[in-house]
Image: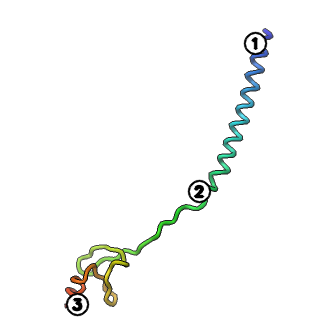
Amino acid sequence: MKYLLIFGLTMAVIWLWQGKRRSALHEKMRQQKPKAQSRPRQLPTTEIVACDVCSVHLPRAEALTHGRSVYCSEAHRRQAQG
């Protein structure tokens, strides 16, 4: 009976020690998460426009403009001009 009581007390001490260790680890991880996710990565954006002749979508930086009109190629610009 004495050995059963000593075994039970030993197991209780180990269980309490493991619980404190686990909670300390969870708290440490909880404090580190906001730091890693505080600034989401921003991707550069590009405005997309459609050609007035064929309606192909392309970035504004690659488009040809004439006044308010937007074209995908020099041929379409000439075609729209007449």
Which of 50 and 60 lies nearest the eye of the viewer?
60
For residue 52, above or below residue 14: below
| Labels 1 and 2: the sequence-earlier one | 1
Which of 25 and 49 lies nearest the eye of the viewer?
25
Which of 46 and 50 lies nearest the eye of the viewer?
46
Tell me what residue is drawn at x 55 percent, y 61 percent. 40
Identify the element where label 1 is drawn.
helix
Q: Position of residue 43 (x, y in %)?
A: 48, 66
Q: What's under tag 3, amino acid-wise?
A: Gln
Q: Is residue 34 left or right of residue 78?
A: right
Tell me what residue is drawn at x 61 percent, y 59 percent. 38
Identify the element where label 3 is drawn.
helix
Q: What's under tag 2, amino acid-wise?
A: Gln
Residue ID for mark 1: 4
Q: Which mark is residue 37?
A: 2
| Labels 2 and 3: the sequence-earlier one | 2
Separation (CA) of disc 1 from disc 2: 49 Å
Quadrant, the N terminus: top right
| Labels 3 and 1: the sequence-earlier one | 1
Residue 55 falls in which quadrant of the image?
bottom left
For the residue carrying disc 3, how many other residues have a C-alpha within 10 Å: few (<14), some (14-19), or many (20+)? few
Q: How many marks?
A: 3
Q: Position of residue 47 (x, y in %)?
A: 40, 75
Q: Is residue 4 left or right of residue 53?
A: right
Tell me what residue is drawn at x 68 percent, y 41 percent. 25
Q: What's under tag 1, amino acid-wise?
A: Leu
Residue ID for mark 3: 81
Identify the element where label 2 is drawn.
helix
For residue 79, above or below residue 13: below
